[in-house]
Image (cartoon, coloured by chain):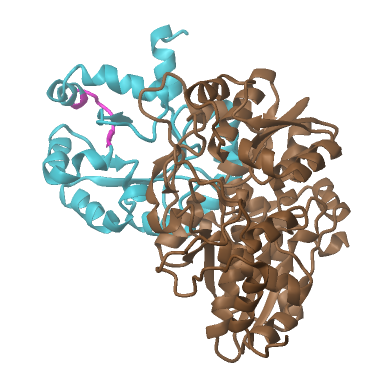
Chain colours: A brown, B cyan
Amino acid sequence: MVDLIPEYWYNVVPDLPEPLPPPMDPPGGADSSIGLLNRILPRAVLEHQFTVERWTKIPDEVREAYANFGRPTPVIRARRLEERIGTKARIYYKYEEALPTGSHKLNAAIPQAYFAAEDGAEGVSTETGAGQWGAAVALAARFYGLRSSIFMVRSSYEQKRERRALMEIFGAEVHPSPSELTGFGRSMLAAEPGSPGSLGAAMSEAIEYALARGWRYLVGSVLDVVLMYQSVIGLEALAQMEELGEEPSLIVGCVGGGSNFAGMAYPFMGAGRKARFLAVGPREVPKFSAGRYEYDFPDSAGILPMVKMLTLGRSFRPPPIYSGGLRYHGVAPSLSILVRAGRVEAVEYGEAESVAAGALFAETQGVVPALESAHAVAAVIDEAKKAEEGEVILFNMSGHGLLELGNYSRILGGGPDGQGDSLPDDRLPHARALPARGRGAEAALRRDGAGDTP
Amino acid sequence: MELGIPPRFAKYDGPVIRRSYEAASAIGRERLMELASEVDAEKYALTYLDDVIGRLDEYLDSLRRAGFSGALFPDLVIDFRGELGRVASLVRSAGLRNAIFVSPSTPDAVVREASAAADGFLYLGVRPATGVPVPVSVESLVRRFRGLHGGELIVGFGLRAEEVSAAVRAGADGVAVGTALLEALPRGVGG
């Protein structure tokens, strides 16, 4: 199976339509935060980030690790979904949720943990929202004999107990963020004792923690090197679609920082495919529609160098939506350029309607999308409904929702914690309010589908 | 020789060069240009286009009068890509040559545009900021840019001794030394 895994990672930066502004030290600093990266990231990861070339050889040990964890992942046709919604398009999805931690995140965790071990680090730290990145890092660290400490955004730490348990099974220490373990965490708690936390803040804590111990910090998204590690997704899919005799006309993925979307889409762009690319963000964190394109810190404390990206600002406090993986203030710099250049379209969906789309997917295909991936599903369904004959839609099923079924029933049922009654805004033509009762939601879905069956 | 004219904000420079700009600004623009004109070597002037784009003709004229051979703007390709042609031809009309700065994150298509405009040399800064030691494969980078540019290719940004030889082996025509020189100055020539 190792043979089917790509031998090289693909980096889109040499093929971007506009120059990618470099990371920048903020004015007035005595030391360089770019230089500080030497103490934070594994050496090889830094080298991959700054030695920009189209193709970077994947070490044999990493390819073997990819195979060990189930790569290549299948591309599957969603026939039952097509029939249910009555589309003229053919819909395919890349089954990244088949990986052991339930999402694509392992593709970037494995190489970084491998390189951290190569550096001789004793342990690694990172932040996590929904828990997908944390679980991937915990597993990858265990695989290479490293300790791991995961700072989990407090609201997710409290909501997603099973994901916390998954990290702990792999031997990680999991801390709710903001925490008392770091200076930054303590200052946040002092300012706001009940703070639900944010990815940007958890990131700062994880970095401070690693710096204090000589550990390495592993990066989940945003940086070009992470998007490059994720390119195995799209590189496999390119070969798989060719084998199926299919040429995608539309490629879709959800966007938190941009890693799963880029992993899928960039290899197709690099191969010069004439497809539309559609990035789906959460309406509750509207970085595509309301973000400014400017230099900003990827983390809340400003330890990392600034990067130029579409951003809502590092102190943006995302609402405590369940789709924790999408609660990030910025969009990867390369993706920001592609969206601004019009090469990638962007759309935003609310959580409630995404979950309804996810439920429909589960009902028809048997696969329960992660809440984040359900945003992509919502967009796919809307696009499929307007598609012409011969259109081929390919999307990334970036993660599964099997550890958050409680959230599905809560949101669809419109219970006390759910958003079933929240009225979506009127910007989105397909936004609709879900009725309070579960059965009502089902009826609402059936109304929109073709071939109703009671 | 590259002489940096202190900008308002040296966005793409590391702390050492930023501090040196602060020291140089204290001398004042006019005196700096006087000193520059006394330098008896082929010299290029470096400053951020952001600072001078509103008075580009005047700036280029002052360079020519001070005896500079050419101009280099580190932010031209990154932040003013659409102006590349116009700025390059203004530089030429002022009797100066274009040294165009590119970096690893410059896409290939843009490097080719820069290459066409560079009648002086193409300057590849291999690291994201001057004087900040992050690991890069200088050989891979120079090979990539050598394939995109037929003219003179100068490589710089924190090159260590072994990287200088790697750059030359991979096809660079010359290397630039900045921060290392500035750090050595207080130690003196033997330092």
Residue A379 quadrant: bottom right
Residue A415 quadrant: bottom right
Question: Left or right: where does residue A118 sit relative to residue A377?
Answer: right
Question: Left or right: where does residue A407 sit relative to residue B30?
Answer: right
Q: Is residue B75 visible?
A: yes
Q: What is the count of numbered marks?
A: 0
The question of residue B93 being in magenta is answered with: no
- Across and down, in percent, residue A321 comes to 57, 50
Q: Quadrant of the N terminus of chain A?
A: bottom right
Q: Is residue A267 visible?
A: no
Residue at (49% x, 74% y) in the render? A430
- Across and down, in percent, residue A440 comes to 62, 73
| Residue A58 sits above or below residue B59 on the image | below
- Across and down, in percent, residue B158 comes to 50, 29
The question of residue B38 being in magenta is answered with: yes
Residue at (17% x, 26% y) in the render? B33
Q: Nearer the viewer, residue A179 or B98?
A: A179
Residue at (74% x, 57% y) in the render? A405
Question: Left or right: where does residue B146 sit relative to residue A149?
Answer: left
Residue at (34% x, 19% y) in the render? B19
In the rendered structure, which segment of residues is drawn in magenta? B36-47
Q: Nearer the viewer, residue A4 or A438?
A: A438
- Across and down, in percent, residue A434 comes to 56, 68
Q: Quadrant of the C terminus of chain A?
A: bottom right
Q: Nearer the viewer, residue B180 or A143?
A: A143
Q: Nearer the viewer, residue B159 or A79?
A: A79
